[in-house]
Amino acid sequence: MPSIQYLAPSASSLVRYPVRRPPPRAGTVRVVCISDTHNEHARLELPAGSAACGDVLIHAGDIFTEAGVRHVDRARDGTVNSISQEGMALFEHFARWFAALDYHKCMIGGNHGAQHPIALSKSSSS
């Protein structure tokens, strides 16, 4: 049976809650939404293939544990001067995981994902 996975604040493991899912109807689009994965995305158990769960996957923000404070050096005006290797590695790990999922995808930056647009532009320009 399908389930929702929830990681409560201060918890050390995901808790599963079973859900009943109606069968898809012709002409509909099924949307799966996740958020607040905070570097724990690889622990999620998303069913393989879009036919198993949905057609579109939305990550609605907060892919990192914090807003890049430890990994991004910013000027006083907020301009990014540099991103640490660890920060880039965190983003690249998430990006590889997200890209490998068999869905149409949308990623929305949250307050704990502020570095990902910068990381994406830096990695695509090299």
Image (cartoon, rainbow, N blue to C red):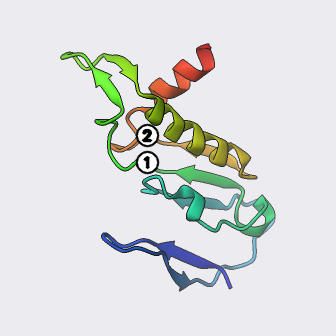
Q: x, y (%) of residue 123?
A: 58, 22
Numbered tag placed on residue 109 in the rendering? 2
Name the amino acid type tagged 1: Gly
Mark 2 residue type: Gly
Residue sticking out furthest to the front: 85
State which quarter of the image contains the C terminus. top right
**Quadrant in the rendering for residue 74:** top left
Q: Label 1, label 2: how many angstroms apart (C-alpha)?
A: 5 Å
Q: Please state if 11 lies on the left or on the right of 29 as rendered.
A: left
Q: Name the residue under label 1.
A: 61
Image quadrant occupied by the N terminus: bottom right
Q: Is residue 79 above or below residue 8?
A: above
Q: Which of marks 1 and 2 is nearer the N terminus?
A: 1
Q: Classify mark 2: residues with Cα within 10 Å, few (<14), some (14-19) or many (20+).
A: some
Residue 115 figure quarter: top left
Measured along the vertical axis of the image, is residue 104 above or below residue 26? above
> Mark 1 touching mark 2, by CB under 8 A?
yes
